[in-house]
């Protein structure tokens, strides 16, 4: 069966009535197939329109053309603060089998925080390391990212899948992410670090989570709880 991608960009809690998940990754080389995009620029301007050509470098977006009101804008990665893309209507038809499940979700608190419209968000991040290097990275927890932002890592490997009504959803959990806590520079964090270093690196200001036994398969749920219940 063809993998299900696009409804998961805005409705994530589907494996259990009370579960939360990160969105599935949209490869940046698929951005050119999206219907619409907007880019928030370092200048403070926003360009919104249809996508033209997309140039890639080392599997990451380097440059994008957006047509707005008949005018074409060529935007370099370094000039972008956030890029949002709307996956094509044709691709959304693959999600029809999920609709009955989505309508019966019981975790209303989680559903209420999710962004509407199905947009996929990419932020420019400064990569870890001594050199000053930047790239666009997909935000994996839109809607519950006010304190901790989880970004897709280009070299991550999927460690989890979930079956929902005979539909297998791949890539709901990777083995590593880029993480930014309270707006600080991102660091790389691995699944094997979570049990012993999760509180130190990510949740050190969250008494609600103290005493909880951290499990990587519950990472998204912990990030959601931290967003909603902690200062």
Image (spheres, rainbow, N blue to C red):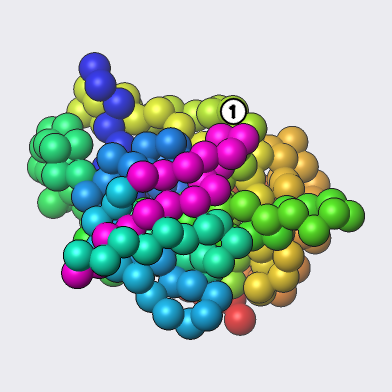
Helix, strand or loop: magenta stretch? strand
Q: Secondary structure at mark 1?
A: loop
User: Badge 1: few (under 14), some or many (20 or more) residues near its Cα, within 10 Å?
Assistant: few
x, y percent for residue 173: 51, 37
Residue at (17% x, 32% y) in the render:
94
Q: Which residue is mark 1?
A: 157
* Whether residue 204 is situated above or below residue 141 in the rendered picture: below
For this view, does 107 lie left or right of residue 151? left
Residue segment shown in magenta: 53-69
Among the 4 quarters of the image, the one containing residue 131? bottom right
* Whether residue 21 is situated above or below residue 115 in the rendered picture: above
For this view, does 139 lie left or right of residue 169? right
* Whether residue 130 is situated above or below residue 33 in the rendered picture: below
Residue at (17% x, 41% y) in the render:
92
* Whether residue 128 is situated above or below residue 166 in the rendered picture: below
Q: Quadrant of the N terminus?
A: top left
x, y percent for residue 188: 73, 48
Residue at (13% x, 51% y) in the render:
103
Magenta span contains residue 60: yes
């Amino acid at each position: 069966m063809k993998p299900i991608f696009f409804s998961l960009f805005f409705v994530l809690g589907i494996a259990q009535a009370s579960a939360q998940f990160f969105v599935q990754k949209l490869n940046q080389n698929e951005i050119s197939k999206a219907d619409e995009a907007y880019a928030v620029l370092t200048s403070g301007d926003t360009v919104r329109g249809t996508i033209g050509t997309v140039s890639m470098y080392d599997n990451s977006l380097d440059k994008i053309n957006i047509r707005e009101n008949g005018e074409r804008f060529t935007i370099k990665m370094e000039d972008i603060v956030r890029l949002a893309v709307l996956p094509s209507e044709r691709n959304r038809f693959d999600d029809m089998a999920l609709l009955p499940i989505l309508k019966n979700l019981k975790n209303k608190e989680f559903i209420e925080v999710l962004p509407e419209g199905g947009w996929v968000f990419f932020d420019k991040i400064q990569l870890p390391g001594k050199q000053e290097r930047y790239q666009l990275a997909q935000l994996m927890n839109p809607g519950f990212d006010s304190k901790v932002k989880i970004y897709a890592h280009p070299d991550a490997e999927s460690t989890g899948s979930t079956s929902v009504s005979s539909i297998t959803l791949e890539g709901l959990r990777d083995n590593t992410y880029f993480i930014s806590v309270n707006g600080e520079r991102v660091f790389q964090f691995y699944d094997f670090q979570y049990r012993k270093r999760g509180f130190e690196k990510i949740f050190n200001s969250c008494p609600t989570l103290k005493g909880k036994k951290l499990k990587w398969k519950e990472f998204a749920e912990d990030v959601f709880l931290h967003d909603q219940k902690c200062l």
